[in-house]
Amino acid sequence: MHAPSSDLAGPPDVYVQAAPPPPPTQDLQERRHVAVAVIGAGFTGLSAALHLAEAGVDVAVLEAKHIGWGASGRAFGQVVPYLKLGHAAILRHYGSERGQRVVDAVAAGPDLLFELIGRHGIECWAMRSGLIFAAHSPGGRRDLEQRTRYWQQRNAPVEMLEGARCAEAIGSPLYRAASLDRRGGNINPFAYARGLAHAAAKAGATLYERTPVRALTRRDGLWAIDAGIAGLSADCVVIATNGYTGDLWPGLRESIIPMRGHGFVTAPLSNNVRHTILPERQSLTDTRLLYSGVRMLPDGRLHASAHGPSFGAEPRADWGRVDARIRRMFPQLGTVKWQQAWTGWVAMTTDHFPRLHELAPGLYAGLGYNGRGIAAATMMGRDLAVLARGARDDTTVFPLTPLRPLGWHRVAPALVRGLVQVYRVRDMVDEYRLSRAA
Ligand SMILES: Cc1cc2nc3c(=O)[nH]c(=O)nc-3n(C[C@H](O)[C@H](O)[C@H](O)COP(=O)(O)OP(=O)(O)OC[C@H]3O[C@@H](n4cnc5c(N)ncnc54)[C@H](O)[C@@H]3O)c2cc1C
């Protein structure tokens, strides 16, 4: 086994080196006024900026670090037509009418994303070969069968893979059943973020990097945006800071629980091994409670998402655990040479649904994707653009809800750590049963 070199500080080299060049950005050197200021340059902020600029709105994006630096540049890369919870929970949560709108829009999320990628010529490994969701337990299999039936009744290209077909599609003897959903796909998320930024700039948006916003103040019917020596005023502000939300607006940070997600990649695999793993280049997740993603990158590296330390500024990459899991799944790998590890903040909400808020007149925020934000944040950006142009929330996918800071936010890390331990034990028991049955 080989320990990976760690690049915990930002998007990983494996994404950055395969991305288009950085988009044109400017320095904010003097005060100016814009119609809409967007804070944060991930998928939410960039999609909002692109949709606004395409509608002819004067929009500026202010990013504390650089384009795609947050979760967007570090995601696993799976473009899913789902939220964290399934259609039944969505209908219960939003009610039947609004819920159906959310279910349908989320199912069409990959269409939106791949259409943007195609229209703007974004080079980001975009591959719409589908997603495999494998059953790691009898309960997981029942859930997948139910979900597959629901989508088949709606003529979606979703099917169950059983027995040898399942083993062949994954390249692993471990799983007996899986659902193949051909609506989804995979991307290089950092390259997608840069591509969105290029498209937004081309449509007329101004992009400011290394421009952390320190404060927002309402003055004479406008928003004054304090961004250091210079600053902006805007008619409307969109906060798109998700798991990286600080103290810009009272209670916003306390309304979500940022939890770390981790990514690991190997050195390129040998030619004969790489073709045995996910040969049709779908990505795989299974039904366990903690992270389980596996995919092959275009240059033959294996990429795994994994659970590691959930909190802390510079957590140690927990690669021993991911190594053991991957070698159990793919015994043909033998020794695995891990090369890079990274981590980013995933914004969780207590009910697992995203949030769209009007925090004050002309001040909006969209966040809390629970690790399903590549398509959902792109959709949320579109919703935020609709609201920033003055429409009401009966035209958006997600409804506006009041901001609800969590009273127990301070102790959330301790509670979540406990919950993760329970999940870990449950996953370990299920995985032991699965490997005994294989
Ligand atoms: C390891 C990992 C794996 C994931 N895998 C997947 C996946 O496979 N599929 C999927 O659908 N989703 C996945 N997600 C979730 C997805 O990446 C996020 O939901 C999505 O990227 C959120 O985008 P965003 O634009 O809202 O936030 P971010 O991309 O986090 O962007 C927020 C930005 O705001 C900036 N910012 C913060 N404060 C300020 C300020 N005061 N001034 C200026 N700028 C500021 C930050 O620097 C940051 O760049 C994953 C997330 C992680 C971390």
Image: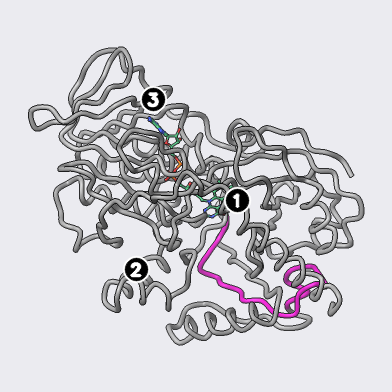
Q: Quadrant of the C terminus?
A: bottom right
- Mark 3 sits near ligand 1, with its Cβ under 8 Å away: yes
Earlier in the chain: of badge 1 and badge 3, it is 1
Secondary structure of the residue carrying numbered label 1: loop
In this rendering, the answer to whether 115 lies above or below 223 is below
In this rendering, the answer to whether 158 lies above or below 309 is below
In this rendering, the answer to whether 271 lies above or below 283 is above
Residue at the left extreme, as displayed: 220
- The amino acid on which the numbered mark 2 sits, given as a three-letter code, is Val
- The amino acid on which the numbered mark 1 sits, given as a three-letter code, is Phe
Asked if residue 225 lies left or right of residue 191, the reply is: left
In this rendering, the answer to whether 217 lies above or below 130 is above
Give coordinates of residue 28: x percent, y percent.
31, 17
Q: CA distance from mark 3 to mark 2?
A: 33 Å
- Mark 1 sits near ligand 1, with its Cβ under 8 Å away: yes
* Residue behind mark 2: 102
Q: Residue at x 41, y 38 (%)?
A: 245
- Mark 2 sits near ligand 1, with its Cβ under 8 Å away: no
Packing grade of label 3 (10 A; few <14, some 14-19, many >=20) is: some
Query: For residue 277, which quarter of the picture?
Result: bottom right
Packing grade of label 2 (10 A; few <14, some 14-19, many >=20) is: many
Q: CA distance from mark 1 to mark 3?
A: 26 Å
Packing grade of label 1 (10 A; few <14, some 14-19, many >=20) is: many
Asked if residue 277 lies left or right of residue 410, the reply is: right
Q: Which mark is residue 348?
A: none
* Residue behind mark 1: 76
* Residue behind mark 3: 212
Query: Decide: marks 2, 1 in contact (CB < 8 A)?
Result: no
Asked if residue 407 lies left or right of residue 82, the reply is: left
Start and end of the magenta stretch?
Answer: 166-186
